[in-house]
């Protein structure tokens, strides 16, 4: 099990009170949480069982505890800028990896990320 730093990203969070321009400011930002995860590549047989298709560069990101996220950013690729509360007003979207499937277990969460479709 190899620990890799990743960022779990959710959107639609209201900005913290100190970052708002006024009380009527209803902008939303990204909530970013750095965590250690076990990142593994998925083999063709596992992809066929989970997604019913084979894709390039599909991964499983295993995180300790129950976590919620919409995207994952790998720390080796990109380090987003966020404040001490975990909020960022913008994130470079090319580094966001969409979570295709989420599975909760007793003490961990598995995020399945499907890459691009493999060429036949």
Image (tube, rainbow, N blue to C red):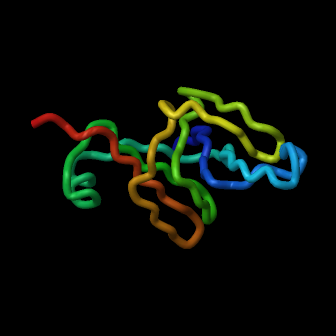
As drawn, the residue found furthest toward the front would be 24
Nearer the observer, 113 or 14: 14
The image shows residue 43 at horizontal and vertical percentages of 27, 46
- Say left or right for 81 vs 1: right
Position above or below: 41 against 80: below
Residue ID at (61%, 58%): 64
User: Which image quarter: residue 102?
Assistant: bottom left
- Say left or right for 61 vs 101: right
Residue ID at (56%, 72%): 106
Nearer the observer, 9 or 36: 9
Q: Quadrant of the C terminus?
A: top left
- Say left or right for 53 vs 85: left
Residue ID at (61%, 38%): 5
User: Which image quarter: residue 34?
Assistant: top right
The image shows residue 85 at horizontal and vertical percentages of 81, 47
Nearer the observer, 12 or 5: 12
Tally of numbered discs? 0
Residue ID at (55%, 38%): 73
As drawn, the residue found furthest toward the bottom would be 106
Position above or below: 64 against 7: below
Position above or below: 101 against 83: below
The image shows residue 90 at horizontal and vertical percentages of 65, 36
The image shows residue 114 at horizontal and vertical percentages of 34, 46
As drawn, the residue found furthest toward the top would be 77
As drawn, the residue found furthest toward the right would be 18
């Amino acid at each position: 099990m190899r620990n890799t730093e990743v960022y779990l990203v959710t959107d639609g969070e209201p900005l913290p009170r100190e970052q708002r321009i006024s009380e009527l400011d209803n902008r939303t930002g990204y909530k970013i949480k750095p965590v250690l995860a076990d990142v593994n590549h998925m083999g063709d047989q596992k992809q066929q069982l989970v997604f019913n298709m084979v894709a390039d560069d599909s991964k499983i990101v295993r995180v300790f505890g129950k976590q919620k996220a919409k995207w994952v950013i790998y720390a080796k690729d990109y380090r987003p800028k966020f404040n001490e509360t975990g909020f960022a007003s913008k994130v470079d979207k090319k580094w966001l990896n969409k979570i295709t499937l989420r599975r909760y277990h007793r003490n961990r969460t598995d995020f399945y990320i499907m890459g691009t479709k493999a060429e036949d």
